[in-house]
């Protein structure tokens, strides 16, 4: 008798299903990195403007850090970008 031949497996995804899966995973990664970035920004903002300003004014009797300080803003942007790259790289390599 002749054996029944199969064209492909049942679990083969169509191109539309692959694109849908890729878009869902990309959207989840972007949403996760945005949430983490916002949390990191507010954490460092609290630490810098709350704790360090309090200690510098009360203990050292120095001036407070301004909120529009270019060094603070640029360092925060660099830190957030580096953490986002680490998160995206880590999530991509675990597959």
Image (cartoon, rainbow, N blue to C red):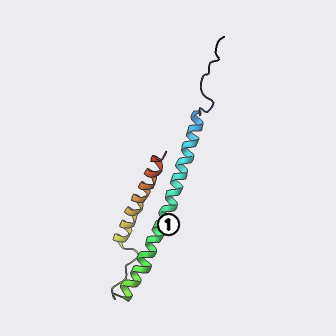
Quarter location, residue 71 = bottom left
On screen, residue 34 above or below 13: below
**Residue drawn at the location 45% of the way across and 47% of the way down:** 93
* Identity of the residue furthest to the front in this view: 1
Q: Is 17 situated left or right of 43 in this image?
A: right
**Residue 73 spot, x, y in % from top left:** 38, 68
**Residue 90 spot, x, y in % from top left:** 44, 51
**Residue drawn at the location 46% of the way across and 66% of the way down:** 40
**Residue drawn at the location 54% of the way across and 47% of the way down:** 25
Q: Quadrant of the N terminus?
A: top right
**Residue 95 spot, x, y in % from top left:** 49, 45
Camera-side residue of 69 and 84:
84
Quarter location, residue 58 = bottom left
Mark 1 nearby-residue class (10 Å; few <14, some 14–19, many ≥20): few
> In terms of secondary structure, where does tag 1 sit?
helix
On screen, residue 8 above or below 74: above
**Residue drawn at the location 55% of the way across and 52% of the way down:** 28
* Identity of the residue furthest to the right in this view: 1
Quarter location, residue 5 = top right
Q: Is 4 situated left or right of 23 in this image?
A: right
**Residue 60 spot, x, y in % from top left:** 33, 87
Q: How many marks?
A: 1
Task: Give the residue pinned by disc 1.
Answer: 39
On screen, residue 5 above or below 70: above
């Amino acid at each position: 008798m002749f054996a029944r031949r199969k064209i492909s497996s049942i679990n083969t995804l169509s191109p539309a299903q692959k694109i849908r899966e890729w878009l869902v995973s990309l959207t989840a990664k972007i949403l996760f990195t945005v949430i983490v970035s916002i949390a990191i920004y507010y954490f460092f903002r609290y630490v810098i403007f709350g704790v360090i300003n309090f200690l510098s004014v009360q203990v050292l009797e120095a001036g407070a850090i301004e909120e529009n300080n270019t060094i603070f803003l640029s360092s925060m942007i660099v830190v957030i970008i580096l953490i986002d790259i680490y998160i995206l790289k880590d999530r991509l390599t675990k597959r």
